[in-house]
Amino acid sequence: MAFGVLVLGLASCGSSLPDECTSDPWENEPCIRALQELCSDQTDAEDCAAVGPFTMEDTGNVYACNWAASVILEDPASCSAAEPTSYCVAVSVDAEFRCADGCESDLSENGMRASTTRDEVLMLSCPPDGASVSGPLDETYLLSDATFSHLTCSPNTQPQADAELCACRAAVCDALGR
C-alpha cells in the first residue's frame, strides 16, 4: 500500500515538521510523535486540514492531518452512543485508492475505525481530492506486533477491529447525523 506526504516542519512551531523528519516515520519515533503532536495541536477542522501533506524523501509516502469524528459507545452491547466530538489526527494518504465514507460503504477501507483501548469509533474525513486516508497514526505504529490504537471496521483488512464496536455502525452514523 502506498502512502504519501510526511513531515518536513516542526511539531510545535506551525504547520511543518522538524527538519530532520525527511524520512518515513514508521520506524522513527521522534518523527511520528512530532507528526502526531502537530496534528493534535490543531483545534478546528479548517486548521487541521491545512496541515500537510508531507512527502517523505526516502519512500515517497505521504502524511497529513485529518479531522476525525469520535463517537464513544456508552454501552457497546446496546450500541448506546454519546454525543460525538471531533479532533485532529495524523494519517497516511494514498492517492492510488479512493476514500469511502464509513457510513456509506460497508467495506470502507478507510472510514470507520474502532479503538483497541476504549469503546470509541472514529470516522476519518475524506480529503477534498478524494484520496484514501489511513490512521490515526500514533506511537502504536512503531510496534513490531502491529498492536494499533484503532483498526478498520472492514472484513477485508487484517487485523480485524473489535466486532462488537463495528456492529454499532448504524448507531455511530446516526450519532454523526449521516
Image: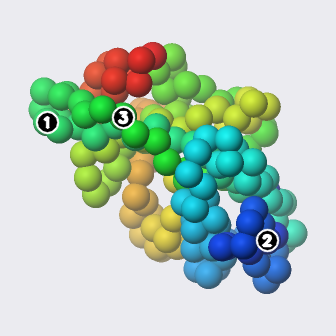
Q: Which amino acid does label 2 sit on?
A: Gly
Q: What element carries label 2?
A: loop
Residue at position x 81%, y 70% in the image: 8
Q: Looking at this rendering, what residue extends furthest in the right direction?
A: 57
Q: How far apart are marks 1 and 2 (CA)?
A: 41 Å
The reply to whether residue 89 is visible in this rendering is yes
Q: Is mark 1 on a helix, strand or loop?
A: strand
Mark 1 residue crowding within 10 angstroms, few (<14) / some (14–19) / many (20+): few
Mark 3 residue crowding within 10 angstroms, few (<14) / some (14–19) / many (20+): some
Report the front residue among 62 and 17: 17
- Give how far across and how far down residue 167 sits, in percent: 27, 28
Q: Distance between the residues labelled 3 and 1?
A: 14 Å
Residue at position x 34%, y 49% in the image: 115
Front disc: 3 or 1:
3
- Give how far across and how far down residue 4 sits, in percent: 77, 54
The residue labelled by disc 1 is 75
First in sequence: mark 3 vs mark 1: 1
Report the front residue among 15 and 95: 15
Q: Which amino acid does label 3 sit on?
A: Pro
The reply to whether residue 106 is visible in this rendering is no
Report the front residue among 143 and 150: 150
Mark 2 residue crowding within 10 angstroms, few (<14) / some (14–19) / many (20+): many
The residue labelled by disc 3 is 84
Report the front residue among 141 and 121: 121
The residue labelled by disc 2 is 9
Residue at position x 51%, y 17% in the image: 104
Quadrant of the rendered image containing residue 174: top left
